[in-house]
Amino acid sequence: MISSKSGESWGPYPLVLAGTVIGVVLIFLVSPKVGGFTLGATVMVAAALRFAGYDGLAVRSKRTDVITLGVSGFVIVLTSMVLADEGLKRMILSLLG
């Protein structure tokens, strides 16, 4: 656990925040597929860091945080990959509309 002099524990929060900002910037500047993959991968890294015992990302219990972050990251990565394929994109939009 990383601690500052005042006793606050940031843990890996700056790393996850930087990865999230990079993912969002890539969504707008490069492509939704690349940015979404980066964003989802960052969330899955946050799950792995929480599982490893870093408390800087602690909101709920460790088990709940790991499951929530892991599933959310996987869904973001999967969505970015599926929506980049035009055939699958048309099929999903036809089911919704």
Image (spheres, rainbow, N blue to C red):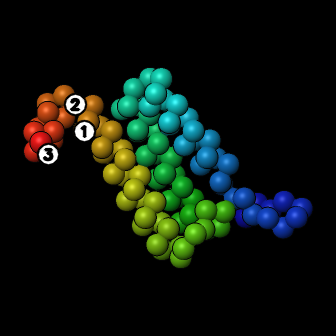
Which residue lies under the disc numbered 3? Answer: 96
Query: Could you tell me which quadrant the C terminus lies in?
Result: top left
Q: Is residue 26 above or below residue 47?
A: above
- Give x and y (percent) for residue 21: 57, 38
Residue plotted at (19% across, 28% down): 86
Q: State yes or no: discs 1 and 2 in contact (Cβ < 8 Å).
A: yes
Which residue lies under the disc numbered 2? Answer: 85
Residue plotted at (10% across, 39% down): 94
Kind of residue at badge 1: Val
Query: Is residue 7 among the parts visible in the rendering?
Result: yes
Report helix, strand or loop for mark 2.
Answer: loop
- Give x and y (percent) for residue 51: 53, 66
How far, Cα to Cα, is label 2 from label 3? Answer: 17 Å
Which residue lies under the disc numbered 1? Answer: 82
Give the image quarter of residue 60: bottom right
Q: Residue furthest front?
A: 97
